[in-house]
Image: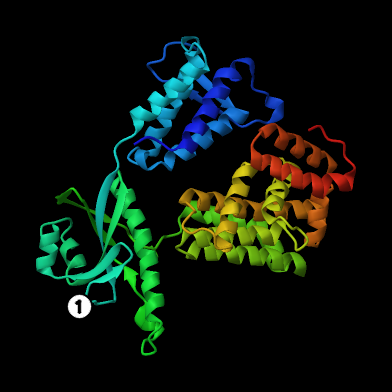
Amino acid sequence: MDVSKKTVESLNKLCGALYLEYPKDSYKPEAKQSIMSRIKPNDIKEGSDYVELYGKYHWLYRQVLSLLRKELSLEFLKDRELDEELWHLTCEIILLRPSFSNFNAVKKRIRQFTFDIVKPIIEYEVLIPILYIDVRDKIIQIGDSIIKSFDETKLIEWGITKESGSPYTFQRFLNKSCFIIREKGNNEHLACNRAREKAYFLMKLLQVALTSSRVLHDVELLYKLGSEVAIREVNQPDNVGFDWIRGFTPIRREIDDKLESDVNSFFEKVSSTIFDGDPDLKKSFRTAITWIGRSVEEEDLDIKIIYLSTALESILTSRSDDKKGETIAYRMLLLNTYLEDSFVHPSRVLYIYELRSEIVHGSKLAVSTMDDYLTMRHIARATIENAILAIKKMGVNRKSDFHNLLDKNEKAVELVLNWLREQGDSRSNTIGDYMEKKCVKKLNVVHCS
């Protein structure tokens, strides 16, 4: 199985830029381009020890890596291993450029690259206990999956014995009603995770179906998936494996000296505004903090992203801002530029906010990743700290005044707009276009595009 057409096109775009443009280009520190400098692979003797990717080349590399990571045929590779494979190809194009007679030769190398790194897709069968329900001797068909109860005999027939897994494994499945779900892939852990996601939806589907009965109360429909699942290959059913997740339950943690220092540092930055500030600002920041706290409590990554996006809206947007994602991205840039602080790439911010919109407006589910959540949580917390610091420096006491001073900071607006135009990706251009509409016309700034 090869990789998708979209991923190949992205690979062609990256390698085309590296082959045709990179040799004539150079890193421009004054443009504040993103940059990645890494040591070259050991088996490539040509060139210097370190290779740099900057600006659009770095952006294209990250884009390709993200697409490769989503390929089912590559999920057996760890993140580090996949990154090393792409880095090797990148260094080949840059350092061994004379060995490629033309771009068609580069495309041929790309085809070989995709052929070499993939592995066949395996069809699995995953057994997932569903707690607090007993289907007895019934077999419930839901789509291409079923729910059935497993006594000792049926468990042994499936391949789970008292000697399987941990000392508690057999009991986790014994006399439980279980989903049997088909899933494809070549990484058992990830296949189990996808099967869990499917089982979670099927459990919700079952709950909704049972609400048609008037004799059931909601407390009788609070089903949960078991913490341990079993997996076997359809074509080799005798080889059974197990996958376990801890679940989203609290873990007791003592506050040590480092954590105490972190807490006190945050309190010192925000307390005057959160507790004693102007009512308008206090309300906005308390709302943002509440939404961040709710995101921590929530298990579902999609809902975490929704809550964190709402927290950022509380600080960086108002009702008059018709494009909330673009507004959050450009005002975060203006805020951090005003404070001369570092920032997460605004295209990343807009991408995550777009996930929020897709979830809220009902077009997608289960699209957010842990990396998306951790990135957005960092942005939300840092925005609270930076916004309070900027508001104190500005001497304002209303959120609208804070927004206006950011939007009318001519030096920062010009600097940010020029930087966005140099990025070259579609989201940076979208943010720049909206920022131009909101800020530049107010200032009558002539800006170099």
Point out residue 109 in the picture as x, y percentages from the top left corner.
43, 21
Q: Which of 392 and 323 is in front in this view?
A: 323
Left or right? Give the position of 381 relative to 273. left
Q: Residue at point 68% right, 23% down? A: 28
Left or right? Give the position of 48 relative to 249. right
Looking at the image, which residue sits at the far bottom? 215
Point out residue 429 in the picture as x, y percentages from the top left corner.
70, 40
Q: Which of 360 and 255 is in front in this view?
A: 360
- Dividing the image into 4 quarters, which one contains the C terminus? top right
Looking at the image, which residue sits at the far right? 444
* Coloration mode: rainbow
Q: Residue at point 59% right, 44% down? A: 348
Q: Nearer the viewer, residue 288 or 187?
A: 187
Does residue 411 sit above or below 111 in this rendering? Answer: below
Does residue 64 sit above or below 217 in this rendering? Answer: above
Mark 1 secondary-structure assignment? loop
According to the picture, the residue beneath numbered tag 1 turns out to be 136
Point out residue 62 in the picture as x, y percentages from the top left corner.
52, 35
The crowd level at tag 1 (other Cα within 10 Å; few <14, some 14-19, many 20+) is few
